[in-house]
Image (cartoon, rainbow, N blue to C red):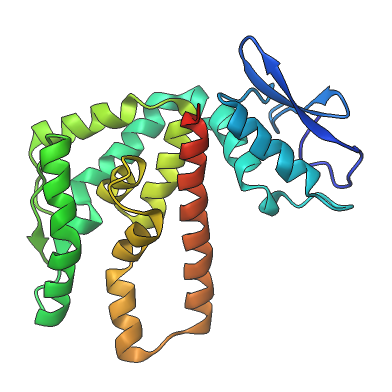
Amino acid sequence: MSEWTQKRFWTRADVEDRADGFSVRLDGRPVKTPARAALLLPTRAMAKAVAAEWDAQDEKVDPFAMPVTRAANAAIDKVATQHAEVAAMIAAYGETDLVCHRAGSPEALARRQAEAWDPLLEWIAESLGAPLEPAIGIMPRPQPPESLARLADEVAALTAFELTALHDLVSLSGSLVIGLAAVHDQATPESLWRLSRIDETWQEELWGTDAEAAEHGAARRRDFLNARRFFDLARAR
């Protein structure tokens, strides 16, 4: 059955332990992905989170209120079927990473960027053996091939579920470095999200907050935090 059925038809969602993973059942019937694949989850914690999302639905199913289910669907239907391509796309962010692009002026913004992002570059050089070089202006600086290869290996080693989470962490922040810092617990997800918004915060301080932009930013922040939670659930024991 497709999980995006319009109306609620079940009474109870529960978790079933299987030899090949964990499934969620609605009144005893296993949930399937939109592509009709079995929704087999890697951890009981993730399965319980998915079941809780189904139990929380009212008369009509709202997929946007089910972030764990949606991410699990993406992991099974999309990422698992093209793991290498997704990993390569994510790793490519390292070539033009947000934290490597610095303002030449004003000096206060450049200083704020350095204070926020230099520690991340130090961490990725020391912990992952992948030093990256910051550059002034919009033109990217070629990064050390050895560092890019090391980061690509780091990304490719993730499972489909972990890679799904990293995809969102990186694409939402614009930074492979920030995404990897999130999954390595280098800082709290909230603080890492703020580090990805240095430029936007600067603009807001200068020109004020635009309501539409603020709403968009809040939605992206929520998705970033959900992605970090999904990574935790993928590794839960």
Left/right of residue 94 with respect to residue 28 in the rendered view: left
Residue 59: percent from left, percent from top:
89, 52
Q: Residue furthest front?
A: 237
Residue 25 visible somewhere in the drawing:
yes
Q: Position of residue 178 (x, y in %)?
A: 29, 51
- How far from the left and from the top, in percent, is residue 138? 17, 64
Q: Quadrant of residue 116?
A: bottom left
Name the residue nearer the viewer: 135 or 120: 120
Q: Is residue 18 above or below residue 13?
A: above
Q: Is residue 69 above or below residue 235?
A: below
At 39% from the left edge and 50% from the top edge, which residue is drawn?
171
Q: Is residue 139 visible?
A: no
Write down the quadrant of residue 166 in the picture.
Answer: top left
Residue 75's image quarter?
top right
- Residue visible at 9% across and 52% down in the picture: 141
* In the image, residue 122 above or below residue 22: below
Q: Quadrant of the N terminus?
A: top right
Q: How far from the left and from the top, in percent, is residue 230?
A: 51, 41
Q: Residue at x 61, y 27 (%)?
A: 44
Query: Which is nearer the eye, 222 or 144?
Result: 222
Q: Nearer the viewer, residue 21 or 148?
A: 21
Left or right: 76 in relation to 173: right
Which residue is farthest bottom?
207
Tell me if residue 187 comes above or below residue 10 in the rendering: below
